[in-house]
Image (cartoon, coloured by chain):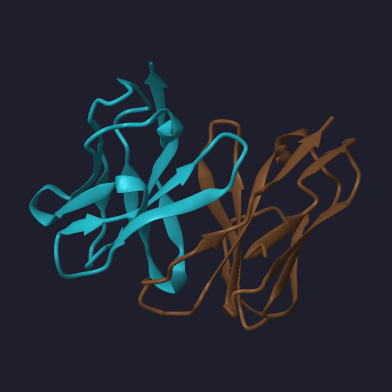
Amino acid sequence: AQSVTQPDIHITVSEGASLELRCNYSYGATPYLFWYVQSPGQGLQLLLKYFSGDTLVQGIKGFEAEFKRSQSSFNLRKPSVHWSDAAEYFCAVSGSWGKLQFGAGTQVVVTP
Amino acid sequence: DTAVSQTPKYLVTQMGNDKSIKCEQNLGHDTMYWYKQDSKKFLKIMFSYNNKELIINETVPNRFSPKSPDKAHLNLHINSLELGDSAVYFCASSLRTTSGANVLTFGAGSRLTVL
């Protein structure tokens, strides 16, 4: 069965500093991987996705993620965090029929 | 124009009542979903419809009944509400693939509070 682990429940980062959020997945076949962001009181917005090809994926808002099959990881990065990046971040893997299995989420707090 | 819209955004009700949440998408997608987000922010799929046909039905109490009158609408009706039903319910839509390479667009969520 597919599963997603986000080891960090909570991360605090200073504005302007770099950010990396970890995601590990378990899936038998080629995974389809996603990162979504949920701002307070809002719905989920797609940041980026990996289906195949180049393992470094660029997304919106300056985010990128790298797929590493050997480590079963799909970590999200941003070189310089803005205060507006404070949110909950979810990694997800998709099974058949688009059934998304989400990780537990990582809450990002940005300090001045 | 909102791509996936849900109503109501907030719903406060008493235990034992029956309530509905409505969802509409204007993206031309053919597949729609209901996800539940609990108090710990954990997201879990409940149902999915493709062209009005139920294709995913997770282990959800029978008190929850989805209905899709057409491929642009997916409603969720909940009977005999319980305290544990308090959550945020998200509607989403996508174009169909059987491979799993679906890209879901989510609505803003409907926060249900059962007192």
Relative to B29, is A70 above or below? above
Residue at 70% of width from left, 60% of height from top? B5
Pick whichever, B1 or A95, lies toward us: B1
Q: Which chain appears cyan?
A: A
Q: Position of residue B54 (x, y in %)?
A: 63, 75
Pick whichever, A17 or B103, lies toward us: A17
Q: Position of residue B24 (x, y in %)?
A: 71, 68
Q: Position of residue A7 (x, y in %)?
A: 29, 32
Residue A1 visible in rendering:
no
Pick whichever, B94 or B33, lies toward us: B94
Q: Which chain appears brown?
A: B
Residue at 41% of width from left, 40% of height from top? A89
Q: For this view, does A22 lie left or right of residue B76?
A: left
Residue at 76% of width from left, 41% of height from top? B112
> Furthest residue to the top?
A112
Q: For this view, does A22 lie left or right of residue B38?
A: left
Relative to B59, is B112 above or below? above
Q: Position of residue A25 (x, y in %)?
A: 26, 49
Residue B37 visible in rendering:
yes
Q: Quadrant of residue B17?
A: top right
Residue at 26% of width from left, 39% of height from top? A78
Relative to B36, is B29 above or below? below
